[in-house]
Image (cartoon, helix red, strand yellow):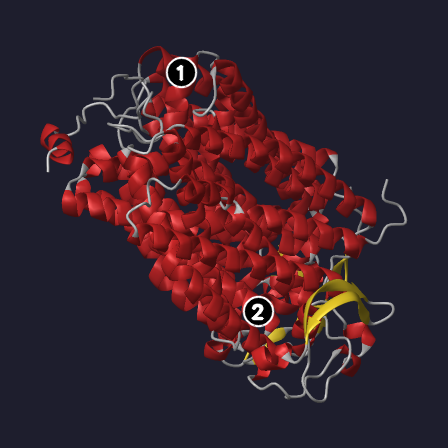
């Protein structure tokens, strides 16, 4: 099996497949961890029961999602070595330490406090438990910091030198970590994670409001989620625009592929709305264009010249159709999310936020939109930087392990089978939890069989305090 | 130059430490999975799962530190060993997926479905452990290197020796799991765990003996390292200490102590691990690549050493706190309020 296949293509397929599955979980858990911290803070501050019910409700979902993020993440950290050993040898001295810092500052923090966050409310008291929740939330953000720094360095490498063995080494750690695309990517991704979570929370709230408009928990979560969409979606579109301008500066070929600009335009490039990019003929077929708009967006001038892929050697072209279309999916969803936010604001002002069924249906259908937009965005940026793993310096074909196609193909099949079996089941469990509305006296994870040590009875006062204020 | 040599050695110890912490901490988690089929009662299984549910994720993180740290500190060794251990590594990852999700999934399904995730928990743990043990044996027997690349096939790791180390690790983790249960449970469950500890200890001693006898036959270097004069003065204490710990362990089992069996088993692991270190040092890929050849540039190792020196003690403190919060015996108590 797989004789005659290209091992590099199989390795790329494996990375794309395992990464696409993985990114869904951290994108959700970054946002959800922060949301849980906010809910617990609101509960501690106001003492309103609805907040602790919502906290326990989403905590159960968080536990399932986080577990899937952990196990699919370990696959990623070992895949650099198994399938991309030449890449690991050459870039290990630079991005290895960034990932080691991710483990030391983020993974241990999340894992160390997760147990207390999930099962420890009765054992440690409110303040320490809130600290644990906060540490988990901060851990997810620190993790995003380091892994996006490593990814950004691969996109826009700075602060490096090359040693006698052909390895990249750091000349300046500050320039490595804070490379040119990193701040933009970090902001764009963290906002994306928050929006993704808000859309899921909003959809769950909407689902229950469609059945009963008077449920306290769904009203609170729907309102909070819609505030996020209203406020953050426009900011995200601005952040994305800035990220795009940064990409134009450092990875122009990626932007050419996103825009479908095969030809250079001397006086104003058109914005190609839709069409089919044909790489063989080097043109966008069936294109629907708006004249000069691309120059206005990218250069803030209608007549500004814009270079096209005709200025880039053909062996350095990224796959244009994928980059072009995934970008359109992301941007289209971004504007839809902003539309949802604005509609909810209108209804809120009119005092009909909880009564407008059309809005609830809209929010419900938009539930998965964040995940799709995140995936489309990552496909845009990762496909658009091909054919390099370290942009302009190390080609993807020179990064792979010296393995034969049957080895890589077999492991690819193993991962496909296992991921679909395991993660679709996990998603079903999460949907099942979401199908129930949060109710009075909502319990945390494993409440049917609590883990409790002999000789330690939870202080009665602590428990009472939890229900009282 | 002297400084660089010291730094590589320091990092060799750091990576070795991370892997050892992983082995002892996830070792008992995985051991519980291996023992799962021997505890068919749902109530027992709930207790077993709950005894590690709050800490397993932290335990597994040491594996990520071992792998990530190796890529950062010894990228050449990481780049050679991972393709060489391709199949065991993939098998380990798949096993860890099933084992890891089972912690949450088994609470989210009906009775029949729950049994399905119990099988995933046990099967995943067994697969991951076997793969880790095989990987260890494959490293010890050496891999085919050409320049800066692995140059062998994807089944080179499969030998009688690597299968032996695979089975040995399954026995070892099972013993850790059994003594963990002795420490964390009560009543009939604890009695079963005592009984299993006896059997597993005997099996573990046989496994240590078999691996110790087989290792010197792999390479002349191993034989010389252990038996040549004057090395033997330094290496002889290891088997003597193994004998001493075994006596203490037998005694603590006979006296039905709670905590001693687990910690003495850890000591047995530490001694076996030290033995491995004695055999391998200073090679990181035996007989091919030394730690100095594989080392990252000084500034990469120094940059990380800074973080390790500050953060690892901190990590040990809050990890210790998490264990402290969930200390004591786990009871199958119901009635949440």
Q: Looking at the image, is A76 positioned above or below residue B24? A: below
Residue B44, which numbered label? Answer: 1
Number of residues whose C-alpha sits closer than 10 Å to that of mark 1, classed few (under 14), some (14–19) or many (20 or more): some
Chain at numbered mark 1: B
State the residue in front, A421 or A437.
A437
Whether residue B282 is visible here, answered yes or no, is no
Q: Name the residue tied to disc 2.
A: A93
**Residue B116 shown left or right of residue A103 in the figure:** right
Say what secondary structure mark 1 lies in: helix
Q: Relative to A157, is A49 above or below?
A: above
**Rendered image quadrant of residue B132:** top right
Q: Position of residue A96 (x, y in %)?
A: 55, 64
Do tag 2 and tag 1 residues touch (Cβ < 8 Å)? no
The residue at the point 15 percent across, 35 percent down is: A466
Spatial CA distance of label 2 from label 1 is 47 Å
Report the label total. 2
Q: Residue at x 66, y 78 (%)?
A: A252
SS for callout 2: helix
- Residue B235 position, x and y percent, is 52, 47
Tell me: A112 left or right of A176.
Answer: left
Does residue A296 appear to the left or right of A385 in the view shown? left
The picture places residue A207, in percent across and down from the top left corner, at: 42, 35
**In this rendering, does residue B173 appear at all?**
yes
Residue B20 in the image, given as x and y percentages of width and height: 47, 45
């Amino acid at each position: 099996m797989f004789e005659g296949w290209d091992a590099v293509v199989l390795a790329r397929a494996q990375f794309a497949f395992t990464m696409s599955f993985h990114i869904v979980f951290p994108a959700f858990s970054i946002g959800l961890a922060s949301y849980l911290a906010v809910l617990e803070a609101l509960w501690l501050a106001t003492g309103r029961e609805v907040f602790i019910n919502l906290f326990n409700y989403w905590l159960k979902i968080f536990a399932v999602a986080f577990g899937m993020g952990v196990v699919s993440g370990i696959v990623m950290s070992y895949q650099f070595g198994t399938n991309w050993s030449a890449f690991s040898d050459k870039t290990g001295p630079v991005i290895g330490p960034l990932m080691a810092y991710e483990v030391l500052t983020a993974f241990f923090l999340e894992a160390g406090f997760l147990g207390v966050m999930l099962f420890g409310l009765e054992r440690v008291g409110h303040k320490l438990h809130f600290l644990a929740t906060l540490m988990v939330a901060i851990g997810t953000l620190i993790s995003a910091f380091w892994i996006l720094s490593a990814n950004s360095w691969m996109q826009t490498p700075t602060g490096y030198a090359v040693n006698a063995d052909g390895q990249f080494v750091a000349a300046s750690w500050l320039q490595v970590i804070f490379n040119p695309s990193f701040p933009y990517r970090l902001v764009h991704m963290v906002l994306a994670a928050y929006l993704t979570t808000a859309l899921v929370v909003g959809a769950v709230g909407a689902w229950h409001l469609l059945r009963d408009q008077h449920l306290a928990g769904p009203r609170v979560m729907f309102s909070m989620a819609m505030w996020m969409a209203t406020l953050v979606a426009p900011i995200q579109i601005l952040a994305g625009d800035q990220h795009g301008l940064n990409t134009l500066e450092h990875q122009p070929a990626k932007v050419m592929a996103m825009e479908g600009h095969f030809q250079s335009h001397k006086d104003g490039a058109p914005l190609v709305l839709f069409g089919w990019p044909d790489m063989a003929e080097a043109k966008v077929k069936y294109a629907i264009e708006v004249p000069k708009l691309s120059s206005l967006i990218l250069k803030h001038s209608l007549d500004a010249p814009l270079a096209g892929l005709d200025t880039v050697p053909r062996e350095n072209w990224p796959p244009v159709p994928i980059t072009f279309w995934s970008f359109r999916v992301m941007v289209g969803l971004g504007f839809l999310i902003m539309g949802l936010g604005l509609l909810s604001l209108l209804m809120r002002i009119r005092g009909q936020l909880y009564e407008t069924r059309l809005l609830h249906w809209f929010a419900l259908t938009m539930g998965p939109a964040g995940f799709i937009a995140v995936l489309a965005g990552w496909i845009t940026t990762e496909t658009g930087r091909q054919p390099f793993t370290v942009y302009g310096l190390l080609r993807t074909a020179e990064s792979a392990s010296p393995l034969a196609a049957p080895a890589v193909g077999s492991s690819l099949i193993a991962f496909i089978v296992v991921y679909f079996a395991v993660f679709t089941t996990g998603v079903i469990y999460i949907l099942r939890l979401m199908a129930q509305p949060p109710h009075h006296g909502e319990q945390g994870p494993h409440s049917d069989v609590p883990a409790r040590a002999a000789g330690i009875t939870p202080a009665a006062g602590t428990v009472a305090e939890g229900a009282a204020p | 130059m002297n400084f660089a040599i010291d730094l590589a050695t320091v990092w060799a110890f750091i990576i070795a430490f991370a892997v050892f912490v992983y082995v002892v901490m996830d070792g008992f988690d995985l051991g519980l999975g291996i023992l799962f089929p021997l505890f068919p009662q749902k109530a027992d299984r709930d207790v077993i799962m709950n005894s590690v549910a709050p800490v397993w994720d932290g335990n597994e993180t040491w594996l990520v530190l071992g792998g990530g740290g190796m890529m950062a500190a010894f990228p050449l060794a990481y780049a050679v060993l991972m393709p060489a251990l391709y199949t065991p590594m993939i098998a380990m990852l798949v096993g860890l997926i099933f084992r890891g999700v089972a912690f949450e999934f088994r609470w989210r399904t009906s009775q029949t479905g729950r049994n399905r995730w119990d099988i995933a928990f046990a099967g995943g743990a067994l697969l991951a452990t076997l793969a880790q043990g095989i990987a260890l044996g494959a490293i010890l027997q050496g891999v085919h290197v050409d320049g800066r690349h692995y140059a062998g096939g994807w089944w080179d790791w499969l030998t009688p020796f690597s299968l032996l180390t695979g089975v040995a690790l399954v026995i070892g983790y099972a013993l850790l799991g059994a003594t963990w249960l002795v420490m964390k449970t009560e009543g009939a469950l604890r009695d079963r765990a005592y009984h299993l500890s006896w059997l597993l200890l005997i099996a573990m001693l046989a496994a240590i003996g078999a691996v110790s006898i087989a290792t010197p036959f792999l390479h002349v270097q191993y034989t010389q390292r252990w038996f040549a004069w004057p090395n033997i003065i330094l290496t002889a204490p290891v088997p003597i200490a193994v004998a001493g710990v075994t006596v203490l362990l037998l005694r603590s089992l006979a006296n039905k102590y709670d905590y001693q069996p687990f910690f003495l088993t850890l000591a047995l692991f530490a001694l076996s691990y030290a033995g491995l270190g004695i055999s391998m040092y200073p090679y990181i890929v035996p007989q091919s690549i030394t730690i100095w050849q594989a080392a990252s540039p000084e500034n990469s190792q120094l940059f990380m050493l800074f973080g390790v020196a500050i953060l690892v003690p901190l990590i040990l403190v809050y990890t210790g706190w998490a264990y402290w919060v969930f200390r004591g015996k786990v009871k199958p108590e119901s009635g949440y309020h």
